Image (cartoon, rainbow, N blue to C red):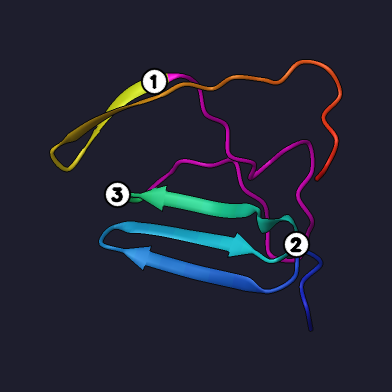
């Protein structure tokens, strides 16, 4: 049986585990160190109320030996596809 959210792709790295779905490229679950970090949803249901969507904010973080700054901006007005 195919899940409503399509194929389920499991990814594991160390103590991190994630499940990404085909429909909408959603993040159905994500945990690290045994702690759930995403308010996910079951394999037999679709995402509701934005669950599983990636939510980020402007922030500074360190990854390996590099410091990066993520700045999120929103476009104003109507954006047309190319």
Disc 2 element: helix
Q: Which residue is mark 2?
A: 23
Q: Quadrant of the N terminus?
A: bottom right
Other residues around mark 3 within 10 Å, as few (<14) / some (14–19) / many (≥20): few
Contact between marks 1 and 3 (CB within 8 A): the answer is no
Q: In the image, is 27 to the left or to the right of 62?
A: right
Disc number placed over residue 33 in the picture, else none: 3
User: In the image, residue 53 lies at what x, y percent?
Assistant: 64, 41
Q: Give the quarter of the image for residue 36.
A: top left
Q: Quadrant of the C terminus?
A: top right
Q: Give the quarter of the image for residue 70.
A: top left
Instruction: Give the farthest residue toward the front.
Output: 82
Q: In the image, is 19 to the left or to the right of 15?
A: right
Q: Nearer the viewer, residue 46 or 22?
A: 22
Disc 3 to disc 2, C-alpha distance: 27 Å
Picture residue at 58% right of the left edge, 39% below the top: 54
- The magenta-colored residue range is 35-58
Q: Nearer the viewer, residue 40 or 9?
A: 9
Picture residue at 62% right of the left edge, 71% below the top: 8
Disc 2 to disc 1, C-alpha distance: 28 Å
Q: Which residue is mark 1?
A: 59
Does the segment drawn in magenta span residue 21?
Answer: no
Main SS, magenta region, reads: loop
Disc 1 to disc 3, C-alpha distance: 23 Å
Sequence-wise first label, 1 or 3: 3
User: In the image, residue 5 lies at what x, y percent?
Assistant: 76, 64
User: In the image, residue 37 lies at what x, y percent?
Assistant: 46, 41
């Amino acid at each position: 049986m195919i899940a409503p959210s399509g194929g389920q792709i499991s990814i594991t790295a160390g103590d991190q585990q994630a499940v990404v779905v085909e429909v909408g490229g959603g993040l159905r679950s994500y945990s690290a160190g045994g702690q759930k970090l995403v308010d996910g949803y079951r394999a037999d249901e679709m995402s509701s109320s934005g669950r599983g969507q990636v939510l980020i904010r402007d922030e500074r973080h360190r990854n390996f030996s590099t410091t990066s700054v993520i700045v999120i901006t929103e476009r104003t007005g109507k954006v047309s596809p190319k």
